[in-house]
């Protein structure tokens, strides 16, 4: 009499098995990202152009408000370029953080039906935001050509800086996506904080305007140091060493915190959703 064998599908018990599961489900990561891209631009009038129009219009508004009305200084750099070099990482960070924070709730039906590493869901939204970030770089190129600015070798660091923004967004997204499953209030809190964050970050102005005594407190916002790094890469503005180091430390701390909390809460997602 032949014995029947059983195949039991369960989540990875050890950390090693879990990361192996993520690699085995890498095609699902790409599928979810591609699905979100298609859904975002399906039945739209201007389609992908919205990725370009949104930062362009925001740049014009911030340039008028801070550069014309408030008459803030941008040094030798055209104010529009100063603003856009801040908007480039900010929109990437804002979109990735907002979408990843609510991603588990949005994909609740999928989570309750089949097992796969849940970390793939918020990671896929960061990947979608990265695609928008890459497309937005074309606006930067056109602006630099318009103002006759020649790039330097620092521009080669732009992919690494983009990866840095992605890691920070992923860390925050993992933390708040797990919290949102348990406490739905965070669906409203995260977008609200991000709306205020554009003014608390050096998007429409330079960090050179921040008083030195307030710098340690100001650079507790990690995106401030990252924007400094972006401006150095694109227009050569010397960044604050303290701001860069602070942003690196906070990014690592946030990413580790997000990973640990997400993994600890992951087994309860299907029940809480």
Image: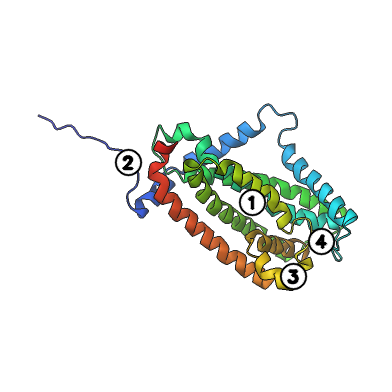
Instruction: Say which residue label 2 marks.
Output: 10
Q: Of the residues tagged 1 and 4, which is closer to the observer? A: 1
Q: CA distance from mark 1 to mark 4?
A: 26 Å
| Residue beneath the point at 14% across and 32% down | 3
Q: Which quadrant: the N terminus?
A: top left
Q: Position of residue 159 (x, y in %)?
A: 64, 57
Q: Of the residues tagged 1 and 3, which is closer to the observer? A: 1
Q: CA distance from mark 2 to mark 4?
A: 54 Å
Indicate which disc, 3 or 2, sits on the residue closer to the N terminus: 2
Element under label 2? Answer: loop
User: Quick one: label 1, few (<14), some, or many (20+) residues within 10 Å?
Assistant: many
Instruction: Say which residue label 3 marks.
Output: 238
Q: CA distance from mark 4 to mark 3?
A: 17 Å
Q: CA distance from mark 1 to mark 2?
A: 33 Å
Q: CA distance from mark 1 to mark 3?
A: 22 Å
Indicate which disc, 2 or 4, sits on the residue closer to the N terminus: 2
Instruction: Say which residue label 4 marks.
Output: 150
Q: Position of residue 32 (x, y in %)?
A: 53, 37
User: Quick one: label 3, few (<14), some, or many (20+) residues within 10 Å?
Assistant: few
Nearest the camera: 265 or 252? 265
Q: Position of residue 9 (x, y in %)?
A: 31, 38
Q: Which of the numbered marks, if any, corresponds to residue 40?
A: none
Indicate which disc, 1 or 4, sits on the residue closer to the N terminus: 1
Q: Which of the numbered marks, if any, corresponds to residue 93?
A: 1
């Amino acid at each position: 009499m032949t014995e029947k064998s059983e195949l039991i599908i369960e989540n990875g018990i050890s950390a090693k098995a879990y990361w192996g599961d993520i690699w085995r489900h890498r095609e699902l990561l790409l599928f979810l990202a591609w699905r979100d891209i298609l859904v975002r631009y399906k039945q739209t009038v201007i389609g992908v152009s919205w990725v370009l129009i949104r930062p362009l219009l925001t740049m014009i508004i911030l340039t008028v408000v801070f550069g014309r009305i408030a008459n803030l200084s941008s040094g030798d750099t055209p104010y529009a370029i100063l603003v856009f070099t801040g908007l480039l990482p900010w929109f990437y960070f804002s979109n990735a953080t907002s979408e990843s924070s609510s991603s588990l709730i949005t994909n609740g039906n999928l989570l309750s039906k089949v097992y796969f590493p849940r970390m793939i869901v918020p990671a896929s939204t960061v990947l979608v935001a990265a695609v928008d970030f890459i497309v937005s770089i074309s606006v930067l190129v056109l602006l630099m050509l318009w103002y006759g600015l020649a790039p330097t070798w620092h521009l080669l660091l732009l992919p690494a800086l983009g990866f840095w923004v992605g890691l920070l967004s992923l860390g925050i997204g993992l933390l708040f996506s797990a919290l949102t499953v348990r406490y739905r209030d965070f669906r409203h809190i995260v977008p609200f904080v991000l709306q205020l964050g554009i003014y608390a970050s050096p998007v429409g102005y330079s960090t050179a305007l921040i008083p030195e005594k307030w710098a340690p407190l100001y650079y507790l916002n990690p995106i401030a140091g990252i924007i400094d790094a972006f401006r150095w890469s694109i227009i050569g503005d010397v960044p604050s060493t303290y701001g860069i180091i602070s942003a690196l430390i906070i990014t690592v701390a946030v990413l580790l915190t997000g990973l640990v909390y997400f993994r600890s809460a992951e087994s309860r997602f299907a029940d809480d959703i």
